[in-house]
Image (cartoon, helix red, strand yellow):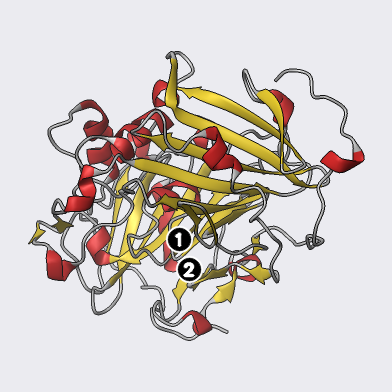
């Protein structure tokens, strides 16, 4: 799925109604109906197809421990508290407010960055489906009702805090170099739908700044209102970004088997990994991870890994979510798989004994190189903690290593 289709779904004039990726692809093309689950690079949704034979279920509930940049003067260099030299998959900042904008705590971490959602008092974010007590369950999906808040313009915005050396400001197309609050910064208007073949859209903005020596943060703002947030509004985020106590990103699962050569790229805690997790940040998902083969370069970036179509050519995802995130009815204790073309790619689902939690391992949208037997083996090796008790979760660096 291309990022511009994700943006169409998030910022359309009618809010999405459930959370399935196949429907989101269609929603980008058909305005009359919008549904949501697997944004960005995830491919097929949680569709179960029967397969013969029994499998061993994961242990669910087990407690597991552009342009020239002017030379910087001393006054324009980053200042303030020192940022920790933290390992990948670590959170090093907390949410904060900047006028009408509100940065949330980060929920995505990778080998190169952390990502947090950004909300606005003047806009509606479509990353939160209504609860079951406010909606009708229909065929495994939850319908979203309109509220008065839907009269506001839509906004999909997120702050990406890159590790030192990971971000390349000179590579931002048509970037304008500025100085904000004594920090070197770059701003640019992005094309309609984030498709480089399209003309620029004033509602689509990127604002990046150097928060520490050779370390950059960038806010991406896709708004239904061309005027808001303005670059000045986005620049207000600069002074509020402060280092916090380093915290390893926790995951509600551990892996028991990973195919040879695959390494973890990014994770989501209380979210799916990558931009998928940001697009459904308040959807109630538990966690996930993306693996690639080989490892992707953690430098020279201008956007998260999965913002570029085809950037991941060989990989797989792990998702641990409520079964209500699936577009099929739960099947307690069952395991089912679906194969892609030539029996490569596809995904496997395993439900908890009570049917409330589903584990999915998918290679859809990330190369599809793994055969179904490998996807199943990965899924069978996953152990899931108490999804509602983070004290039972495992630091990502440990959880992702068999």
Q: Residue furthest right?
A: 74
Task: Indicate the position of residue 176 as horizontal and vertical percent values.
Answer: 66, 23
* Circle 1 residue: 377
Judged left or right of residue 161, residue 157 is left
* Callout 2 secondary element: loop
Query: Where in the figure is residue 232, as x and y percent of width and height?
Result: 56, 37
* Residue 142 in the image: above or below residue 71: below
Give the quarter of the image for residue 351.
Answer: bottom left
Residue 309 visible, this orientation: no
For label 2, the crowd category at 10 Å Cα-Cα, with few meaning under 14, some 14 to 19 and many 20 or more, is some
Mark 2 — residue? 381
Near-viewer residue (143 or 286): 143
Instruction: Determine if residue 363 is in view.
Output: yes
Side of 238 where 16 appears, left or right: left
Residue 148 lies, in percent from the top left, at 17, 52
The numbered mark at residue 29 is none
Give me the C-alpha separation between circle 2 and circle 1.
6 Å
Is 216 in front, or is 402? Answer: 216
Mark 2 and mark 1 residues within 8 Å of each other at the beta carbon: yes
Give coordinates of residue 231: x percent, y percent. 55, 34
């Amino acid at each position: 799925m291309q990022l511009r289709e994700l943006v169409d779904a998030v910022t359309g004039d009618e809010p999405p109604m459930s959370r399935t990726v196949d429907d989101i692809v269609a929603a980008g093309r058909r305005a009359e109906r919008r549904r949501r689950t697997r944004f960005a690079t995830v491919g097929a949704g949680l569709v179960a197809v029967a397969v013969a034979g029994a499998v061993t279920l994961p242990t669910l509930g087990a407690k597991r421990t552009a342009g020239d940049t002017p030379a910087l003067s001393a006054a324009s260099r980053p200042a303030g508290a020192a940022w920790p030299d933290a390992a990948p998959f670590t959170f090093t900042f907390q949410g904060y407010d900047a006028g009408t904008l509100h940065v949330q705590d980060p929920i995505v971490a990778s080998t190169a960055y952390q990502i947090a959602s950004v909300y606005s008092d003047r806009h509606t974010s479509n990353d939160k489906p209504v609860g079951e007590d406010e909606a009708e369950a229909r065929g495994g999906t939850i319908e979203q009702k309109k509220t008065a808040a839907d009269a506001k313009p839509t906004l999909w915005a997120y702050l990406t805090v890159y590790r030192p050396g990971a971000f390349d400001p000179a590579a931002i197309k048509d970037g304008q170099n500025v100085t904000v609050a004594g920090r070197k910064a770059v701003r640019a208007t992005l094309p309609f739908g984030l498709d480089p073949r399209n003309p620029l859209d004033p509602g689509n903005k990127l604002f990046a700044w150097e928060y520490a020596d050779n370390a950059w943060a960038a806010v991406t703002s896709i708004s239904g209102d061309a005027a808001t947030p303005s670059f000045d509004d986005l620049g207000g985020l600069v002074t509020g970004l402060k280092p916090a106590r380093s915290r390893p990103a926790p995951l509600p699962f551990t892996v028991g088997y990973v195919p040879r050569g695959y390494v973890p790229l990014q994770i989501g805690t209380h979210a799916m990994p990558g931009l998928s997790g940001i697009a459904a940040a308040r959807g109630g998902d538990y966690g996930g991870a993306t693996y690639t083969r080989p490892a992707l370069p953690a430098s020279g970036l201008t956007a998260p890994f999965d913002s570029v179509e085809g950037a991941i050519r060989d990989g797989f995802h792990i998702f641990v979510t409520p079964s209500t995130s699936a577009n099929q009815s739960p099947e307690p204790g069952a395991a089912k798989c679906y194969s892609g073309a030539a029996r490569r790619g596809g995904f496997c689902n395993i439900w908890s004994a009570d049917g409330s939690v589903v584990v999915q391992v998918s290679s859809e949208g990330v190369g599809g190189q793994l055969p179904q037997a490998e996807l199943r083996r990965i899924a069978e090796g996953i152990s899931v903690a108490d999804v509602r008790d983070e004290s039972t979760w495992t630091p990502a660096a440990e959880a992702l290593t068999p």
